[in-house]
């Protein structure tokens, strides 16, 4: 009897062992469910639409992608975040200068493979002289997922109420005309350290007007402005009628036009650029084939449909989306796309913009954001005193207020007095980016020097 029981037990154990081995094998053979990680500068509206639509796609099913986890990170932290995380798959949104920084830092992988190359062929290499791909020796390291222009969004009701003209050029926003409502600003812009799109607009002004005159325009525009922490807040202020003009990326303007008949988007006649907003594969990706599938979907006509959402309103990089049923319903966006392709553009160098980007951003923050109250007070007093001054004296005081070559401070590295020339900005750009202590020192030094120059203008006007 015991012998039979032993046989039964052995048989049961053998069956259990066989079943366990089978289930283990089946579990091991089951494809891994992938969660992609995407570092991004895009807003929640875009990210939610992208996740929802991509996860329903055949590509997501083919590559067994269960979810896409988005990591919204401020531009200055991208390089450190990518390196410290070590497993982020895709970078998406933030502008070409940011992606060129990732390229220079060796963080981008070339986009290779039949699937991704087939869809990238539908994206032009450049539009109106601006790159839509970063190419090195035939390898593509980033590609534009959308395109943008830059200009102003205006509130016609506000301008009419205060008797202000509609701006036509960037330089108009630096005019004393828009100081008429101060201390209640009529113009809005964003802190360069908080907004890549506003940074791009300041770079456009610097390259359109040159370093010296460009900074005068930027400084007086800031004096006329309320400076916001986010570019989206500029758009919202225009829609509400808090301000009459806000410098914005184009799709903020298109959204404002849909939300309020009082709003209108204007591409400045003194020039803008067509910007490609990139997407790229990161070298840290643990799932490069799945990551390339996501990128291919974003670039496809199907993925480009997210830009057509009336609450998003971005211009696609792949114009084939306008041939889809959804695209044919957005004739207004197609017309905006065509106008952008024919807009007045300036000759713009990404390399030049990148050579002083971080110095420019933190100089803006230190001299225009932190001491803005003193800047506005000095500008108000100067404008109010204009009739009492000769034209030469007025221009002289504007230069004291705003000319970067008359902005004197002590270089902490050498102890010598210097000015904020383009060459100086380029010489410290990398250290500003890499050395937080140095950056903090420069912000403090620049802020103190800016306060002194604004006080000097007030003192001159009181004499």
Image: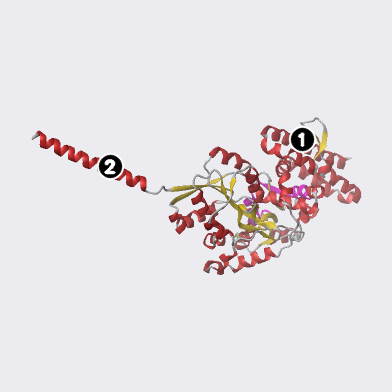
By secondary structure, the bulk of the magenta-drawn segment is best described as: helix
Foreground residue, 165 or 39? 39
Whether residue 195 can be seen here = no
Q: Give the residue furthest to the front.
A: 137
Q: Nearer the viewer, mark 1 or mark 2?
A: 2
Mark 1 or mark 2: whose residue is earlier in sequence = 2
Secondary structure beneath dot 1 equals: helix
- Examine the structure image and report whether residue 30 is included in the region drawn in magenta: no
Q: Which residues are magenta?
A: 217-243
Q: Position of residue 404 (x, y in %)?
A: 81, 43
Question: Please, is residue 266 above or below residue 215 in the view?
Answer: below
Question: Please, is residue 169 above or below residue 358 in the view?
Answer: below
Residue found 66% across the figure and 53% down from its top: 242
In the rendered view, does 26 fall on the left or right side of 166? left
Q: Quadrant of the N terminus?
A: top left
Question: Pointer 1: what residue?
Answer: 448
In the rendered view, does 113 fall on the left or right side of 61? right
Disc 1 crowd rating (10 Å Cα; few below 14, some 14-19, many 20+) is some
Q: Quadrant of the C terminus?
A: top right
Secondary structure beneath dot 2 equals: helix
């Amino acid at each position: 009897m015991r012998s039979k029981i032993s046989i039964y037990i052995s048989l049961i154990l053998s069956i259990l062992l066989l079943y366990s081995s089978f289930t283990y094998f089946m579990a091991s053979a089951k494809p891994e469910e992938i969660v992609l990680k995407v570092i991004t500068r895009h807003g929640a509206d875009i990210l939610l639409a992208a996740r929802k639509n991509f996860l329903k796609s055949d590509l997501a099913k083919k590559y067994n992608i269960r979810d896409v986890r988005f990591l919204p990170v401020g531009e200055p932290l991208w390089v450190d975040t990518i390196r410290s995380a070590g497993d982020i798959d895709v970078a998406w949104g933030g502008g070409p200068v940011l992606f060129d920084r990732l390229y220079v830092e060796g963080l981008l992988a070339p986009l290779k493979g039949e699937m991704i190359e087939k869809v990238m062929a539908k994206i032009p290499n450049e539009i109106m002289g601006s790159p839509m791909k970063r190419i090195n020796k035939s390898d593509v390291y980033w590609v534009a997922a959308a395109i943008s222009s830059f200009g102003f969004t205006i509130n016609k009701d506000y301008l009419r109420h205060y008797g202000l003209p509609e701006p036509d050029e960037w330089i108009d926003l630096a005019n004393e005309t828009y100081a008429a409502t101060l201390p209640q600003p009529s113009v809005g812009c964003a802190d360069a350290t908080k907004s890549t799109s506003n940074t791009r607009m300041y770079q456009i002004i610097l390259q359109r007007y040159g370093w010296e005159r460009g900074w005068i325009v930027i400084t007086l525009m800031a004096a006329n402005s309320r400076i916001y922490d986010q570019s989206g807040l500029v758009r919202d202020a225009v829609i509400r009628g808090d301000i009459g003009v806000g410098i914005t990326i184009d799709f903020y303007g298109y959204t404002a036009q849909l939300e309020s008949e009082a709003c209108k988007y204007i591409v400045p006649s003194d020039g803008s650029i067509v910007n490609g907003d990139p997407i790229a594969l990161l070298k840290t990706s643990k799932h490069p084939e799945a990551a390339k599938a996501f990128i291919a979907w974003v670039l496809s006509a199907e993925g480009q449909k997210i830009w057509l959402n009336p609450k998003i309103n971005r211009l696609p990089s792949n114009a084939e989306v306008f041939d889809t049923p959804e695209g044919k319903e957005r004739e207004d966006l197609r017309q905006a796309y065509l106008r952008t392709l024919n807009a007045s553009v300036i000759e713009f160098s990404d390399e030049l913009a990148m050579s002083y980007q971080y110095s420019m951003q933190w100089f803006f923050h230190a001299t225009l954001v932190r001491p803005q109250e003193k800047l506005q007070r000095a500008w108000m007093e100067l404008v109010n005193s204009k009739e009492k001054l000769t034209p030469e004296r007025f221009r002289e005081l504007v230069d004291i207020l705003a000319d970067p070559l008359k902005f004197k401070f002590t270089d902490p590295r050498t102890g010598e007095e210097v000015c904020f020339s383009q060459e100086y900005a380029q010489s410290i750009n990398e250290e500003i980016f890499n050395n937080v202590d140095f950056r903090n020192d420069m912000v403090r030094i620049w802020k103190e020097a800016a306060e002194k120059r604004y006080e000097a203008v007030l003192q001159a006007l009181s004499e």
